Image (spheres, grey):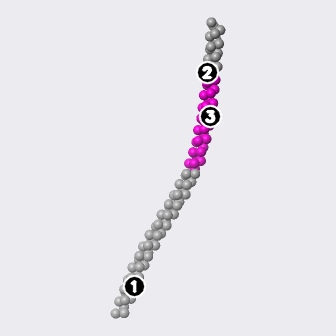
Amino acid sequence: MDVAPWDEAIVRMRAALGRLETALEKRLRQDAQRADAEQEFHIMQDDRARLAVDLDGALADNRALSQANSAAGKALERAARAIESVLAHAGAEAE
């Protein structure tokens, strides 16, 4: 009769150890997933920083192209006015 209580205690202890091992495995998987998520987050932050630099460069290029376009438009307007003036002057002399 003295053996039965020890056997029951051993069975309960083995069950408790089994639950502890299961909980530990679950925790280790969660820690690994968290580490993966943190690594992915850092990768995303690096990508975001790189994209921000690329965007700044693209915006600067866009501003430069816009200014060049404006300057070219003004130069074309001046050239058109000069051509019109020459043609008007040549037409006046031909009359």
The amino acid type, in three-letter code, at marker 3 is: Gln
Foreground mark, 3 or 1?
3
Q: Residue at x 36, y 93 (%)?
A: 2
Which residue in the structure is indicated by mark 1? Answer: 10
The quadrant of the picture occupied by the N terminus is bottom left
Q: How far, Cα to Cα, is label 3 from label 1?
A: 84 Å
Q: Position of residue 81 (x, y in %)?
A: 62, 20
Which residue in the structure is indicated by mark 3? Answer: 67
Is-magenta flag for residue 67?
A: yes
Residues in magenta, as a range: 50-78
Task: Work out which residue is located at the far bottom of the displayed protein and give it.
Answer: 1
The amino acid type, in three-letter code, at marker 1 is: Ile
Q: Residue at x 55, y 51 (%)?
A: 48
Q: Residue at x 42, y 78 (%)?
A: 17
Is-magenta flag for residue 76?
A: yes
Task: Work out which residue is located at the far left of the displayed protein and give it.
Answer: 1
The quadrant of the picture occupied by the C terminus is top right
Provide the secondary structure element on which disc 2 rests: helix
Main SS category, magenta section: helix
Q: How far, Cα to Cα, is label 1 from label 2?
A: 102 Å
Which residue in the structure is indicated by mark 2? Answer: 80
Foreground mark, 1 or 2?
2
Contact between marks 3 and 1 (CB within 8 A): the answer is no
92 shown above or below 10 = above
